[in-house]
Image (cartoon, helix red, strand yellow):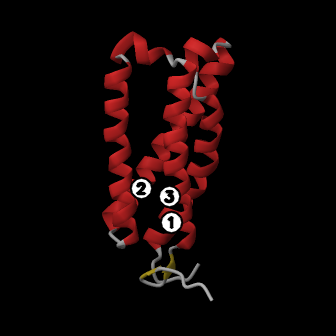
Amino acid sequence: MATTRQSGSVNMRPVSSLFLLMLVAHVAHVFEEVWGGFWLIQAVFGLGWYLVGNWVLFCIPVVLFYLVLQGKRSAYILGIIYAGIMTLNGFGHNIAFAVTGRYFNGFAGGYTGIGLVLVGLPMMRLLFKAMARPWEQE
């Protein structure tokens, strides 16, 4: 019989599963942007600084994930913001690609952007639900 990690009385399995999926989608999204030649990489940052910046931006949600598992209320709030930013990022890539028609050396990141949206929206909902009503069981 599998045990579930509890924070208060909220079942953390769906929250932690979605958070892990978002972290995987985040890494895949950065890989897709590099592979597809997202215009911002060469035009503004260069590949090295772009990857350094994304590494830092990836470490922050990893720490948030740990703090969410510890039941820290502020981590729930910041996790909701992270999921919201990644959801908007996914929407942005897909809208820009649809408007311009440029994927390679344009707005690469749309395929994993779909995953960011599909994971981000339920992640925001579950984090908000777990934060707002910790006394209820999932």
Circle 1 SS class = helix
- Give the distance between the C-alpha atoms of the residues marked 1 and 3, in whole angstroms: 5 Å
Q: Name the residue under label 1.
A: 16
Residue 124 as seen in the image, left or right of residue 43: right
* Residue 42 picture quarter: top left
| Mark 1 vs 3: CB contact within 8 A | yes
Q: Where is residue 53 in the image (x, y as percent from the top left)?
A: 32, 32
Q: Position of residue 47 (x, y in %)?
A: 38, 20
Q: Name the residue under label 3.
A: 19
Q: From where the camera sits, is residue 124 visible?
A: no
Three-letter code, disc 3: Phe
Q: How crowded is mark 2: few (under 14 residues within 10 Å), some or many (20 or more)?
A: many
Q: Mark 2 points at which residue?
A: 79
**Residue at left offset 42%, top offset 83%:** 8
Three-letter code, disc 1: Ser
| Mark 2 vs 3: CB contact within 8 A | yes
